[in-house]
Image: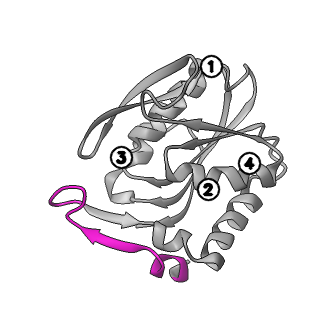
């Protein structure tokens, strides 16, 4: 895992002073690194009956789409407001540096479908918690949350105590 960590660029004071940003795009551009991440996620969730992989905008799309393909599941994007063309449900959340909300198409998940939420990074857990609320609102069965990077010092797991969380890399 140290090899994967070395491929992540750390950018101080982004998006505002005092924030250390973990830029996973430097890992994603590396063919072996990207392949390794998708293989790790696939091995973790293959055979779990996942029917939908929900990717959180935007890097959750990058990880979620190939994972959904490998699992034989559908892919569902969760996006910032105004980006999805059909009727949506909305959930708000708090970031470590602001507020925002996410939307999902109202017909994206059927009641009882097994759902895995995927994102690149979990910090305070705000986006993951909002997405979990959307899945619950649609009566999907949340199997878990998978992230590439977890910033443990921000205690995001506390906001998702009832959720099975798998993180590849922890800081």
Q: Is residue 160 above or below residue 58?
A: above
Residue position marked by numbered label 3 in the rendering = 124
Query: Is residue 141 visible to us here?
Result: yes
- Could you tell which of marks 2 and 1 lies nearer the N-terminus? 2
Q: CA distance from mark 4 to mark 1?
A: 19 Å
Q: Is residue 170 above or below residue 79?
A: below
Residue nearest the observer in this picture, 52 or 25: 25
Mark 2 lies on a secondary structure that is: helix
In the image, which is nearer the foreground, mark 3 or mark 2? 2
Assess whether mark 1 and mark 2 are in contact (beta carbons under 8 angstroms). Answer: no
Disc on res. 68? 4
Mark 3 lies on a secondary structure that is: loop
Residue position marked by numbered label 1 in the rendering = 138
The residue that appears at 74% across and 48% down in the rendered structure is 68
The residue that appears at 16% across and 61% down in the rendered structure is 18
- Could you tell which of marks 3 and 4 lies nearer the N-terminus? 4
Numbered range of the magenta stretch: 3-19
Q: CA distance from mark 2 to mark 1?
A: 23 Å
The residue that appears at 80% across and 50% down in the rendered structure is 71
- Could you tell which of marks 4 and 1 lies nearer the N-terminus? 4
Task: Specify the quadrant of the image occupied by residue 51.
Answer: top right
- Could you tell which of marks 2 and 4 lies nearer the N-terminus? 2
* In magenta stretch: residue 10: yes
Mark 1 lies on a secondary structure that is: loop
On screen, residue 112 versus residue 146, left or right, reads: right
């Amino acid at each position: 895992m140290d090899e994967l960590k070395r491929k992540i660029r750390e950018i101080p004071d982004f998006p505002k002073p005092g924030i250390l940003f973990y830029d996973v795009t430097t890992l994603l551009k590396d063919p072996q690194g990207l392949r390794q991440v998708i293989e790790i996620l696939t091995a973790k969730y293959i055979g779990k009956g996942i029917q939908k992989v929900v990717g959180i905008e935007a890097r959750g799309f990058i990880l979620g789409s190939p994972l959904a393909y490998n699992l034989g599941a559908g892919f569902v994007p969760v996006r910032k407001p105004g980006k999805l063309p059909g009727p949506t449900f909305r959930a708000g959340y708090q970031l470590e540096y602001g507020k925002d909300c996410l939307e999902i198409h109202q017909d994206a998940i059927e009641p009882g479908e097994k759902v895995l939420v995927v994102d690149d990074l979990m910090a305070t857990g705000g986006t993951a918690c909002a997405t979990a609320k959307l899945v619950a609102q649609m009566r999907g069965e949340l199997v878990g949350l998978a992230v590439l990077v977890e910033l443990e010092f921000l205690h995001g797991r506390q906001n998702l105590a009832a959720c099975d969380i798998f993180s590849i890399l922890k800081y």
